[in-house]
Image (spheres, rainbow, N blue to C red):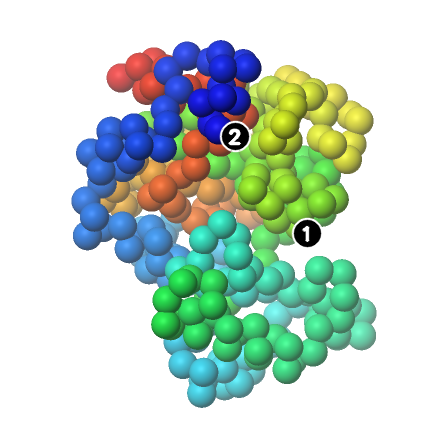
């Protein structure tokens, strides 16, 4: 399917799944180090240890019996993100915010503590990680920079930056849509926006079927729009890649309203959709940088 789509736009140096695995993932990353990226709790420990900007960790819950005790330490916050440590594709992530009456709100509706506890229990039971158990990570909720609201105001967008041997070689902006329930993942109805890495500007928008010059929920043209903190995003990506013994990484960066660029997470198995979004193959990008 990927190759068929590529023949439409005909970019150079397209990589398929097998080639990416053999020439990038297996060739540059040791399997015993995969867990450093796959496990969000371990990743956060590395980021905190290296003083790399990322969301503050409020709690890590590994046992169901500890849920209420750990939750008592978290509920003082006005907003938070609850995540499975070993989840994938954005599954199991729940964003909580308090309204004026101190009720918890998630996905636009009030949610009870019992529902929150059940969700945490599901995470610990491995529902979102395809295993018999997992850890639940509760962390600071990023407040997106106003730049993103100019494109689309809901959810938490992020930049996916691909690094090889500590060099950023390709990037895209992943944006939520009215159909994605606040998630920016492309396979969950988010959209990808290409990035001109030399200029630090946005290019075309790709919704999985077609290319446009604007977000599907906003007619404002984004082609050529300057990305704030672009040099800082590149520097943060390089510092993050150096912090991990993994020479091929997908690094997700968000821009917080107050704190600026922050690392959201790192990935060993970066998706290939970034090639479609940028109308450019990974082979061509690698050849340009090496």
Which mark's residue is nearer the viewer, 1 or 2?
Answer: 1
The x and y percentages for residue 262 are: 49, 46
Residue tagged 1: 181
Q: Kindly report the distance in space between the C-alpha atoms of the residues bearing marks 1 and 2.
A: 20 Å
The x and y percentages for residue 137 are: 46, 66
Q: Is residue 49 left or right of residue 174?
A: left
Quadrant including the C terminus: top left
Helix, strand, or loop for circle 1? Answer: loop
Picture residue at 50% right of the left edge, 86% below the top: 69
Which circle marks residue 172 in the picture?
A: 2
Q: Is residue 57 left or right of residue 41?
A: right
Note whether residue 198 is visible: no
The x and y percentages for residue 38 are: 35, 53
Q: Residues within 10 Å of mark 2 (few under 14, many from 20)?
A: many
Name the residue nearer the viewer: 273 or 145: 273
Q: Is tag 1's residue or tag 2's residue first in the polypeptide sequence?
A: 2
Which circle marks residue 282 in the picture?
A: none
Picture residue at 31% right of the left edge, 32% below the top: 18
């Amino acid at each position: 399917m990927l190759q068929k789509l590529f023949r439409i736009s005909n970019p150079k140096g397209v990589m398929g799944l097998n080639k990416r695995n053999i020439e990038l993932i297996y060739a540059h990353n040791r399997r015993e180090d995969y867990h450093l990226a796959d496990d969000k709790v371990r990743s956060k420990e590395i980021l905190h240890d290296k003083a790399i900007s990322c969301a503050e960790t409020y709690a890590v819950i590994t046992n169901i019996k500890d849920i209420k005790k750990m939750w008592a330490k978290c509920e003082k916050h006005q907003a938070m993100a609850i995540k499975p440590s070993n989840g994938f594709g954005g599954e199991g992530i729940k964003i909580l915010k308090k309204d004026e009456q101190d009720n918890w709100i998630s996905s636009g509706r009030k949610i009870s503590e019992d529902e929150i506890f059940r969700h945490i229990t599901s995470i610990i039971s491995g529902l979102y990680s395809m295993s018999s158990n997992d850890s639940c990570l509760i962390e600071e909720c990023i407040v997106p920079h106003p730049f993103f609201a100019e494109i689309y105001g809901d959810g938490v967008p992020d930049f996916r930056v691909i690094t090889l041997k500590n060099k950023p070689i390709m990037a895209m902006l992943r944006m939520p849509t009215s159909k994605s329930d606040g998630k920016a993942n492309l396979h969950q109805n988010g959209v990808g926006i290409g990035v001109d890495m030399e200029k630090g500007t946005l290019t075309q928008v790709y919704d999985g079927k077609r290319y446009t010059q604007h977000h599907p929920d906003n007619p404002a043209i984004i082609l050529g729009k300057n990305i704030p903190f672009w040099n800082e995003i590149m520097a943060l990506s390089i510092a993050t890649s150096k912090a991990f013994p993994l020479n091929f990484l997908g690094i997700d960066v968000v821009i917080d309203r107050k704190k600026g660029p922050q690392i959201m997470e790192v990935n060993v198995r970066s998706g290939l959709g970034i090639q479609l979004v940028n109308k450019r193959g990974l082979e061509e990008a690698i050849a340009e940088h090496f």
